[in-house]
Image (tube, helix red, strand yellow):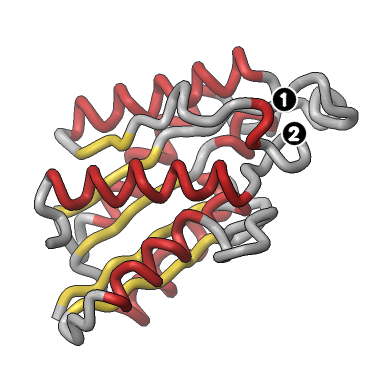
Amino acid sequence: MSTICIFGDSITYGACDYEFGGWANRIVLFLNKLDDFDLTAYNLGIPGDTTNSLLTRFNIEAKARNPNIIIFAVGINDSQDSTITLTKFKENLVNLIKKAREFTNEILFVGLTPVDESISGIKEDNYFNEKIKKYDLEIKKVCNEEKLKYIDISGLISSKELEDGLHPNSKGHEKIFVRAREFLIKNKVIK
């Protein structure tokens, strides 16, 4: 039996996708349609999660499900949290990977989405595309160093596909789902 756990933040959780509950939930639904009873997937996205908070809940969530495949989609909230510097972010990513390797070597990361800085509240909440790109680049670097798969979604989502300036709308979530599904199939993570 294979178990996929998808850990992340509100975007992983599916915020603002009023049709199917987000890209991660679309992965769960896609896998359910395969009628493969040896494959189970869990969307473990928590709104507001950072790598700090994910580190505190990871072991409990993973032990309860014993995953063969772990997908991380976290970092956008780290980019706006002044206590999580790039150095701390990298340290957290490495610690997450270390914890994940206690369960499996099949570990993937999904890149970060942009924000629409013209929407009221985005800049005030300290979400800036320039900083998000730096955190996304750090994810890519860590994946390269740790020899892990990285699903690049840079340039995939336009500002028209951001419901509130931060979270993708249903169309945006659909695009992330398709990119992730194709990547998982192409890399033989799922069949």
Kindly check if marks 1 and 2 are in contact, taking CB atoms under 8 A apart as contact. Answer: yes
Seen at 62% across and 43% down, the residue is 168
Residue carrying label 1? 116
Place residue 119 in its image quadrant: top right
Residue 112, x across and y down, in percent: 49, 33
Q: Position of residue 103 (x, y in %)?
A: 21, 65
Q: Amino acid at mark 2?
A: Gly
Q: Please tell me whether residue 160 is drawn above or below residue 95 in the rendered image.
A: above
Question: Which residue is depicted at the point 60% across and 13% down?
Answer: 130
Q: Is residue 131 left or right of residue 147?
A: right
Q: Secondary structure at mark 2?
A: loop
Check disc 2 and report the residue beneath it: 165
Q: Residue at x 61, y 63 (%)?
A: 19
Q: Which image quarter holds the C terminus?
A: bottom left
Front residue (pair 191, 101): 191
Vertically, is 153 above or below 141?
Answer: below
The mark found on residue 96 in the picture is none
Q: Is residue 160 left or right of residue 125?
A: left
